[in-house]
Image (cartoon, rainbow, N blue to C red):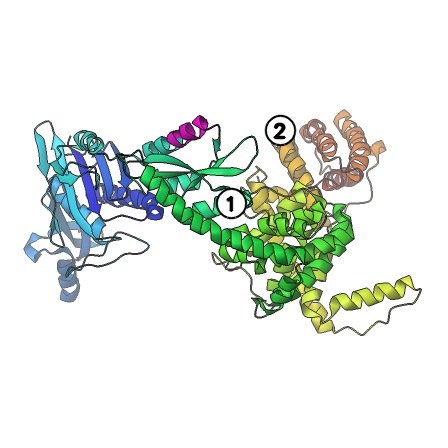
Amino acid sequence: MPDLLIELFSEEVPARMQGKARDDLRRLVTDGLVEAGLTYASAGAFSTPRRLVLSVEGLTAESRPVREERKGPSTSAPAQAVEGFLRSTGLTLDQLERRAEKKGETFYAVVEKPGRKAAEIVAEVLEAAIRNFPWPKSMRWGAGSLRWVRPLQSIICLLSDEGGAHVVPLTVDGIVAGNVTEGHRFMGNGRFTVTGFDDYAVKLKRARVVLDTAEREAAIWQGAQNLAFAAGMEVVADPGLLTEVAGLVEWPVPLMGRIAEAFLGLPPEVLQTSMKEHQKFFSVKNPKTGRIEGFVTVANIEAADGGEVILKGNQKVLAARLSDAKFFWENDLRVARAGMAEWAEGLKSVTFHNKLGSQAERIERIAALAREIAPLVGADAEDAERAARLAKLDLRSSMVGEFPELQGVMGRYYALEAGEKPAVADAARDHWRPKGEGDAVPTEPVSVVVALADKIDTLTGFWAIDEKPTGSKDPFALRRAALGVIRLVLGNGVRGLNLYHTFAIGWNSHTIPGFWAKIAADNASLKSGKVPKSEPMDMEWVKRRNGVIADLVSFFYDRLKVFLRDQGVRHDVIDACLALPGADDLTLLAKRATALSETLKTEDGANLLQGFKRANNILSQAEQKDGVEYSFGADPKFAETDEERALFGALDTAEATITPAMAKEDFATAMSAMAALRAPIDAFFTAVQVNADNQIVRRNRLNLLHRIRTVCSGVADLTRIEG
């Protein structure tokens, strides 16, 4: 079986595109080969800045012959139908077969396609892959029609087996495939021929090209760590930067330099961000001081002077970048130490959304909402309101204008410089969190309050203007905001955050002019012993508000199902818990759903569910038939069997445990008591016929089933559980 080697050699491919390009090349080629009738043992894709490579091992030498049969029209069909069938098959009338069937004679087309050589198929598949390659951005050059991310210079397309290597005949836009490539742009030894993948990889390494991206990453990281260790320092890990830098070099040579003393006073996040974004440098930290004091750059060449000139050039450029950062920092400190009023004023002219007002108006809403919900989190209301008013002021700072990813981080520094409490300053940094699935959830009360108020204002605002997520479209990241609220509430065990009430407050602040001023005036009236003046309510407005809030709560429950599903809790289990009171308390709901999920995973829990459903089905059918609800209470004196009497006792025991346990929110105990009903319920149905001939006994047993339903429904609505 031959092996296939493909190399697409071009000018430098952007590092951010290489990973997907590798996957796309492997997918397009291997899928095309399989579709054409070839099989293979394994395939691996590789990339460097100047080449995409695919190695396919164990490729079949030719495709299998194919025999296709197609049923056509009846032999008595109109001529037009027969002619259409002939056109679709490419056959003539005398080439069709006639076969007798129940409804008469029918035409059949039998097309036999012989097997094709691998080289022929590979040429077709590779040309199609090249011409239809899904680059995010592509270009044309010269007089050709081919589009590629950068000018494509040469192609290797080589089939090799025990008999030798053979170039696949292929020409794409004037580029003829061959068996020749070249190594490093500066350190390579000219163009050379290859006979297969193993020969190719060895000769590339000799020509100063490391083909495997993972190998380049390992070399960069190990080299950087060695340099830092020798200087008594540590490299700050940055997996994303490591992958990017590995896509910029073919022969990585790490070099370490020092940051000038004049810039060491900058915050470490500023140094790290500036070096990463502008220079692609790794930051090097002094473990004794915690400061960023050096950097590691990765050259693409082994310099004769050991990289001295390269380092000098990099340090010169870095000094210019850090001089800008230092200017921004010092200018921002001046504003921060003056109280940041300049930035607060500036946010009045920054539009958050054309239907939701300016950032300054948004800050006012967030601050008022933060004060409202602070007691629920155990935060000081004054601190929460103050933190909310300061949290977004750094959006007007020069540093965040240059590095938007530092928003919040710089806000904390500036708040501290302004003399704010640490808890207030921390909220400026943490209120953005969690930004994504892997981001940590803040735990400090003030930070949690501001983070919640920020996200709730966003959600209620966009619901108020009917800008909700639709399908896969979520331009304002509202799903992420909802998931952020859920993670904040559950991660901190926040209780009493009534979704309907909280969302109503958020809605009112967006739709009632001067809402928070009216609330403040009413509170002042109450404190002075006066009854606030009430105004008639527009019932249409109330109806619309309630509908929108109900829709937003439903959206939240959907997000909660997604979140808990990832933790092993099924959606129907959550639905069963949503049917009970207190469902708008997310922490309570999640605890109950988790406990129920764990119970249903046990043998007793699963069997109890079946017993409950049997009892409920019998009871529901009887109630529908008799036109009465059997909720009069069962009497043990009418019990005729030991199993029946045992079920009465088991229900008494379970109820005595479940009721106080649910009141204490001890869901594990309540679920365990419910699961313990499994055995007596099973025994009851084995020994007892519910619909007895004696109507008094029958009604008593139906009332007993109603009691099973009532006891279990005190834990969850088990009718909503699937299975």
Residue 262 — which label?
1
**Disc 2/disc 1 C-alpha distance (Å):** 65 Å
In-image side of 520 versus 610 (left or right): right
Residue 459 placed where, x, y %?
A: 61, 59
Q: Which residue is mark 2?
A: 602
Is the magenta region chiefly helix, strand or loop? helix
Q: Is residue 221 magenta?
A: no
Q: Secondary structure at mark 1?
A: helix
Count of residue discs? 2
The outermost residue toward the right is 529
Residue 631 placed where, x, y %?
A: 79, 45
Front position in the image: 35 or 72: 35
User: Within 10 angstroms of label 1, few (less than 14), some, or many (20 or more) residues?
Assistant: few
Find the magenta span and give its range: 222-232
Q: Amino acid at mark 1?
A: Ala
Q: Residue at x 62, y 42 (%)?
A: 573
Q: Quadrant of residue 658?
A: top right
